[in-house]
Amino acid sequence: MTVAEVLRADAIILTHLHADHWDDAARNLVPRDMPIFTQDEADTAIVRKDGFTNVIALTEQGFVFKGVTIHKTIGQHGTDEMYKVAPLAELLGKTMGIVFQKPNYKTVYVAGDTVWNKEVEDAFTRYKPDAVILNTGYAKLTTFVDDSIIMGKEDVYRAYKFSPNAQIVSVHMDTVNHATLTKAELRRFIEEKHLDKQRALVPNDGQTYKF
């Protein structure tokens, strides 16, 4: 997908400001008046300081944009143990997920950069999504820390079981150098677990789905 195609979007949602989500290229290429949604006023201030004029902080109560209600959900970019270490907690920072709702359309939950936790389960329970987008690259900060800072293949299985009517779409793999789970490995896992491939989806680069 080209930059021009990406910039045909109606808006941009920044779940957080880590460089693999909001980098110098984006700051230079995104039109200054593009609607941009952020997780809180702190991120909003940073994006506005970069010269963007239409920046909105989301809430769990929701914001209606072009007929779609966008809800903020809570994420956690690492384990509880990681967040007990102050420098690591500062590095990981805060993050959010997103739920899209529109009458007569399917509900979509984008979990974002988060591990599986109670807040994720609460989002499943509250919104009952028809489609769920999970960042499943099982990214690690260092080889000395076993735990991941986002979800992995076991979380795909967990989501598949937790929400038996939802399609689970796994993304954020084969992209950044600290992601340890590949699409090929996840597809093998889906085969081994005998998951329905119409529900457990691993898109190819550039592939799109309609729900």
Image: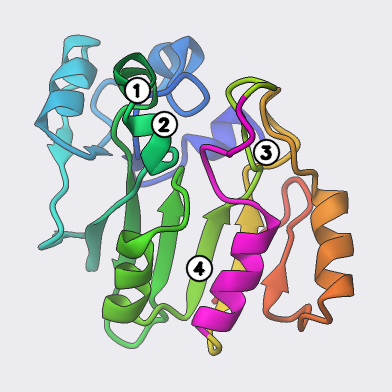
Q: Are marks 1 and 2 in contact (CB under 8 Å)?
A: yes
> Are the residues flagged by discs 4 and 2 in contact, CB closer than 8 Å?
no
Q: Nearer the viewer, mark 4 or mark 1?
A: 1
Q: Which colour scheme appears in the figure?
A: rainbow
Which badge, 4 or 3, comes first in the chain's sequence?
3
- Distance, label 4 to label 3, CA atoms, is 22 Å
- Of the two numbered discs 3 and 2 in the rendering, the one whose residue sits closer to the viewer: 2
Return the residue at label 3: 1
Front position in the image: 19 or 93 = 93
Residue with the mark numbered 2: 82
**Three-letter code, disc 2:** Met
Give the mark toward the camera: 1 or 3: 1
Q: Which mark is residue 132?
A: 4
Mark closest to the chain's N terminus, 4 or 2: 2
- Residue 109 drawn at (x, y percent): 41, 65
- What residue is shown at x 22% (from left), y 40% (from top)? 39
Element type at mark 4: strand
Residue placed most toward the observer, 51 or 70: 70
- Could you tell whether 133 is left or right of 44 in the image? right
Residue plotted at (24% across, 10% down): 50
